[in-house]
Amino acid sequence: MDRLKEKSQQLSTITQMSAGIAHEIKNPLTAIKGFLQIGAANPELRDNYQDIILDEVNRIEAIVQDFMMLSKPKSSLQTEEVEPGDVVSYVTRLLAPEADEKNVQLIFNPKRINETIRTEPKRLNQILINLVKNAIDAVDTGGLVSIVAELTTHELTLSVSDNGPGLNAQELSKIGEPFFTTKEKGTGLGVMVTKKIVGDLNGTISYKSKKGEGTKVTVRLPR
Ligand code: ADP
Ligand code: MG
């Protein structure tokens, strides 16, 4: 592609992203403003809106956090020797309360790998957190989310499987597009951020899903 075309495509991506961000932040702001105005005019109603206002502030915070992750340069990588099992155990413990609350079984069989890979624990954590959260969100009460970690000579494979509703071909093609979400409180940025971080770690990510059967996401990271 010639440089001019490339530049104009970049510009159009930036324009689209900015419009998306502005829109996604404006919606909760409008809601917050509206509820504050109602509260100002009717002090006796204020308590009714506190939780909505907090929810909407949290949504703005989540969007901003995701974008901060996106803008982190790859050069900020701080790698160290990490035992993959430790990372998965950490994330499993971190998300256990969320899974429990929904009565979702979170399974991780830490096959003692006993070997390390050189990577950045923070980014690796973030990948797993995003994928496991999506899996927990996807399944019904009583559902199953399972994490498998495998290490070969060349790579670490992490997979997160769920028995949720799965995705059809059209949804699969949309996943990872900015602001694609089917959740009432979603940001639609999680998968995009995850893909970006996997790229920072020189890895690959793939989705395998069947409508009605569940989803399996596999991340491969070179050692
Ligand atoms: P968010 O979680 O805020 O909606 P994501 O980018 O993390 O944003 O996910 C985008 C969408 O992809 C979700 O809203 C959901 O529709 C779909 N999705 C992601 N992971 C799964 C999964 N494991 N099973 C079914 N759908 C999923
Ligand atoms: Mg998500």
Image (cartoon, rainbow, N blue to C red):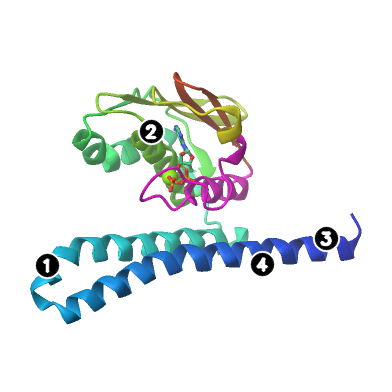
Q: Amino acid at mark 1?
A: Asp
Q: Is mark 2 within 8 Å of ligand 1?
A: yes
Q: What is the distance, in whole Å, between disc 1 and disc 4 at their CAs?
A: 39 Å
Label 1 vs label 3, nearer the camera = 1
- Residue 167 against residue 193 in the figure, above or below: above
**Dot 1 or dot 3, earlier in sequence:** 3
User: Disc 2 on helix, strand or loop?
Assistant: helix
Label 4 vs label 3, nearer the camera = 4
Q: Quadrant of residue 175?
A: top right
Q: Give the label on residue 15, or none.
A: 4
Q: What is the distance, in whole Å, between disc 3 and disc 2 at their CAs?
A: 37 Å
Q: Which residues are magenta?
A: 173-202
Q: Mark 3 sits on what residue?
A: 6
- Is 153 in front, or is 177? 177
| Within-10-Å neighbours for mark 3: few <14, some 14–19, many 20+ | few
User: Disc 4 on helix, strand or loop?
Assistant: helix
Q: Amino acid at mark 4?
A: Thr
User: Disc 1 on helix, strand or loop?
Assistant: helix
Q: Mark 1 sits on what residue?
A: 47
